[in-house]
Amino acid sequence: MDSAIPLAIAGSFCTATSSMCQRRGARSTEATRVDLRLIFRLARRPIWLAGLASQILGFAFQVGALRHGPLALVQPVFALELLLVFAYMTVLGGGRVKRRDWLAAAAMSAGLGLLLFAASPSGGRPHAPASLWWPAGLITLAAVLAGLAVAFGLHRRSPASARRRAAVLGAVTGIAWGFVAAVIKEFSSHLGQGAGPLLGSWSLYVLIGGGAASLLLASHALAAGPLAASQPGFTILDPLTAGLLGLFLFGEHIQTAPVNLAAEALALTLLAAGAATLSHSHLLAADTPRPADAAKQQRDPVAYDSDHHDPALDPRHDLSPTPLT
C-alpha cells in the first residue's frame, strides 16, 4: 500500500508526457470518423512515438501501483496528469500564468488530497467474479459506442463541433481507460505466479485488446481538437470510472459516514471545477496549429517534428481555433 501512491505519481508523470507528445504529433490529423489506420499514420512521427513510449512506461508504473493498492486509491492520483500537462505548457509556452490558473491548480490539488483522505480506500479482493465482469464490460462497451455515435455524428467542418468532438472522445477514452485500469488490477494479481497462470488468465488478452482500443480512442481524441477539449475527459472520467469499478468488481471500501460523504462530494466538486477551469487555460488552448504549420506537418511530418521550435507552444502566435479539413 505504501508504494502504490509513489508509483501512481510516476505513472501520471508519464501519461502527462504522453499526452503532450501525442497531441503534438496528432494535432494536424483529421479525425472526423473512426479510422483504424490512424495509428499507422501517426507512427511516422517521432514525437508521437516518444509519447507512445512514455505511455507504455506509465502503464508499467500503473501495473505496479494497482498490484499494491486498490483502484479507488490509485486511479484518483492519475488526475495529477492535468496539473503536469499544465506545468509542461507553462514552461514550454513561456506565457504568463494567470491567477485563475493557479487557483484552479490549487483547487485540483486540494480536491485530490481531500478525496483520498475522506474516502480512505481500502480492502477489496484480488479477483472479481465473472458474473460481475460481464455486466461491467457490456455497460462500458455500450457507453463507448454511444459516445462514438455522438462524436462522429457532429457536423464535420464546424470548428465548434471539432472541439465538442474532441471533448466527447476524451470522455469516451476516460471511460475506456477506467475499465482498462480494472483489468490491470485483475491482471496484476497473477504477477509472480509464473508464466503458466499469467498466460492462462483471460485478463492478459482483454488487456491487450482493451489497451489497443483505448490507444486508438485516445489518438482520435487528440487528433480531433485541442488538448484543452479532450483532457478533462481523460482526467476526470478515468479515475471516476475506475473507482466505481473498484467498488463494484473488487469489493473495495470507502468511508461512508455522513461527514466523509460530504467531504468526498466537496473534493469531487473541487477536482471537477479545477480541471474544467485549468483545461481552458490560454496555455493549454495554445496548441491549435496555424493553417501554414498544419499544412507543413501534413506534407512532411518527420521534418516538421524534427524542428525544435514548436509554433503551437509559442504564446505569441494566433490562438484562434483552426477548422479541421
Image (spheres, rainbow, N blue to C red):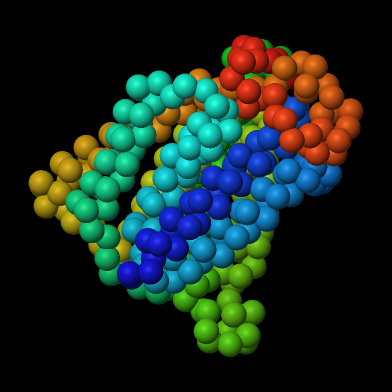
Task: Answer left or right for 270 relative to 239.
Answer: left
Task: Answer left or right for 159 relative to 246.
Answer: right
- Where 141 sits versus 154, above or below? below
Q: Nearer the viewer, residue 58 or 166?
A: 58
For the C terminus, the quadrant is top right
Picture quadrant where residue 60 is located: bottom right
Residue at point 33%, 38% (across, down): 108
Residue at point 44%, 63% (across, down): 7
Residue 142 location, x and y as percent? 54, 44
Inspect this view and state whether residue 133 appears: no
Q: Nearer the viewer, residue 219 or 152?
A: 219
Residue 212 location, x and y as percent? 68, 54
Inspect this view and state whether residue 304 appears: yes
Task: Answer left or right for 87 relative to 250.
Answer: right
Residue 133 location, x and y as percent? 47, 62
- Where 251 sits versus 316, above or below? below
Residue 185 location, x and y as percent? 46, 66
- Where 296 sits versus 61, above or below? above
Q: Nearer the viewer, residue 43 or 20?
A: 20
